Image (tube, rainbow, N blue to C red):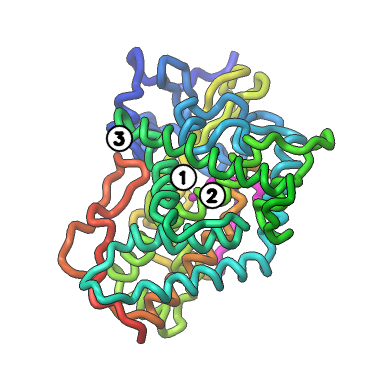
Amino acid sequence: MGKVIPKQEGIDHSVDFLREGYLFVANRRKSFQSDIFETRLLGERVICVGGEEAAEVFYDANKFMRQDAAPKRLLKTLFGEDGIQTLDGAAHTHRKHMFMSLMTKENIDRLLRLTHREWKQIEQSEKEVVLYDVSQQVLMKAVCEWAGVPLAPEEVVRRTDEMRLLFESGTSLGPTYLQGRKARTSAESWIRQMVKEVRTNRLLPNEQTALYEFSWHRDESGELLPEEVVAVEVLNILRPTVAISVYILFTVLALHQFPNETEQVRQGMLTKTEFVQEVRRFYPFFPVAAARVKSDFEWNGYTFPEGTLTLLDLYGTNHDSSIWTEPDRFDPSRFKGWKESPFNFIPQGGGDVDFGHRCAGEHVTIAVLEQVIELFTEEFSYTVPPQDLSYSFVDMPSLPKSKLRLADVKRI
């Protein structure tokens, strides 16, 4: 007989999850004084875990699977159906290789050249720019060209807004969620038509692009992926890249709110990588990751029954005092000489980036944010006018309330 998992009393705690957001799991880990507890969400029994040891177990493919783990509402907005996030085993490994084939240094450098070109366009006559809006269009125009996806100038605003809705609407209620579903349908139709054109040689993207590679990719059985699945996977390149805009806001916010650390970057006392990693650790991005128990197993004396939905506390693990000294203090120097672990630093998920479920675009995120630091410390001068820079731990994704307005943006 295994140990009894601490259990949150009550019929259902879905409303509490929406009310507490990023802190839902962390709050209960603290109150139970346990890295594991049981709750109920959307009428289902859920086991919640956190910490480095729990993350290592969570990303063990022999113990957990992703099939049927994500709520349907996220498949209808954020992820799309039948995409890589829903695969396990050989099918996942094969599909992951398709993504990782694009993540070469040469390809990432090409994306950075494209983003740099777009960033140079933001100096303009207007008094202020809203960084969230600007950065999304910068990223959308750059990643579409990088991915081989034609994007007409008159479509930039509409298609960028669709990508934003895909990652903003999944946890929303009412009209915003419906807008997200509409955006998913429209975006998939847009890309699916391109896949048809690629396969009939009416559209000829570069062979090193996502649209080309994914359109001609064959699954482990040797069959071409269905057009609708290719569309989902191409959007799994576009959407997460545009979502880096959330981290861009927090990166520039940190440059503004932590001037001593910013000056250390300018002086070479801190590297851009160290600053970026602390931004990714410190600020909220993903709250949790979800998986289902593959078959009964026991961990630390606790029994995990087959099929049980399990949530890993991403934000809480990145702020776990047993892992990080003074976790609520912004301190990029903690990454000096840091020995990277795939299980204690998990802002975009944990595990192996090449074969596991860790985000395939993590290296792209880091590279883009390092470029942003260079731009906003060396290439652009600007001011930050008075505004509401607070951010919520309830809203997902969390953003500075003002979406960061910048004034007097000029090339140095």
Dot 1 falls on a residue whose secondary structure is helix
Q: Which mark is residue 317?
A: 1
Magenta segment's dominant SS is loop
The residue segment tinted magenta is 337-355
Of the two numbered discs 2 and 3 on the same chain, state the one appearing first in sequence: 3
Residue 409 among magenta residues: no
- Type of amino acid under label 1: Thr
- Type of amino acid under label 3: Glu
Q: Could you say where residue 153 lies in the image, as x and y percent from the top left?
A: 45, 61
Q: Could you say where residue 283 lies in the image, as x and y percent from the top left?
A: 37, 54
Of the two numbered discs 2 and 1 on the same chain, state the one appearing first in sequence: 1
Q: Could you say where residue 207 lies in the image, as x and y percent from the top left?
A: 73, 59
The answer to whether marks 2 and 3 mark residues whose Cβ atoms lie closer than 8 Å is no
Q: Which residue is mark 3?
A: 20
Q: Which residue is mark 2?
A: 344
- Type of amino acid under label 2: Asn
* Mark 2–mark 3 distance (CA, rounded to whole Å): 23 Å
